[in-house]
Amino acid sequence: MLPGMPIRIAPSILSADFARLGEEVKAVSEAGADYIHVDIMDAHFVPNLTIGPDVVRAIRPYTRLPLDVHLMVSHPDALIPAFADAGADILTVHAEASAHLDRTLQLIRSHQVKCGVSLVPSTHERALDYVMDTVDLILIMTVNPGFGGQSFLRSQLPKISAVRHMIAATGRAIDLQVDGGIKPGTSTGVISAGADVLVAGSAVFKGNPHDYATHIAALRS
């Protein structure tokens, strides 16, 4: 992390109570979250199936925070227009899922939405080399994507640090987001490595909604 860099928290609604999803989004927004992270899985790119654009549209009225939509899908180009229309503010795609990554990012931008690129743990950071002038956000996965509640992979800390240096070399304001096993015991190392946006699910959505502010503050510190 660079001196003075604000740490932003993006609670993942994958761990929220889906029977009262709108209220959960409102609660974390009021508790001090910076983004609302929405995990989209297609049971093909990852071994799980979650939600579609109608759910993004349904939660949009419950928060003024940016909806940070992470597309863990095999054919992102086909879904980008629908999620942009549903109210996404950021659309993040996987470098591994797009044969023409720059074209995919340009498609996102054409919908007046910020664009991000995510890397699974086995993908080298150099996969980002030729899109650094385009991306608004880089997401480093510190678990193998597909399910919440997995253990943090410390092997990804050097990758986070390397990407932070890549961002600095561009002179651009690019968010460096980390997702997977984030909790107070792991957030310190992630922040030290250079991350400035932390995605957390079970570390935020636990206990009573009145506790969410305490959980968010613990991640920041």
Image (cartoon, rainbow, N blue to C red):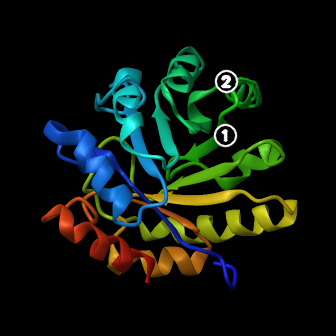
**Direction from residue 41 to residue 15 in the image, left or right:** left
**Direction from residue 181 to residue 3 in the image, left or right:** right
Instruction: Look at the numbered discs 1 and 2 and tell me whether their residues touch, using CB distance below 8 Å.
Output: no
| Location of residue 101 by image quarter | top right
Q: Nearer the viewer, mark 1 or mark 2?
A: 1
- Label ID, residue 197: none
* Residue drawn at x 17%, y 45% as measured from the top left: 17
- Label ID, residue 114: 1
* Residue drawn at x 33%, y 41% as measured from the top left: 146
Q: What element carries label 1?
A: strand
Upstream in sequence: badge 1 or badge 2 = 2
Numbered circles on residues, count: 2
Q: Where is residue 3 in the image (x, y as percent from the top left)?
A: 69, 85
Q: Label 1: few (<14), some or many (≥20) within 10 Å?
A: many
Q: Which of 115 and 186 is in front in this view?
A: 115
- Label ID, residue 99: 2
Q: Where is residue 9 in the image (x, y as percent from the top left)?
A: 45, 64
| Location of residue 109 by image quarter | top right
Cα separation between marks 1 and 2: 20 Å
Q: Position of residue 108 (x, y in %)?
A: 67, 28
**Direction from residue 15 to residue 87 in the image, left or right:** right
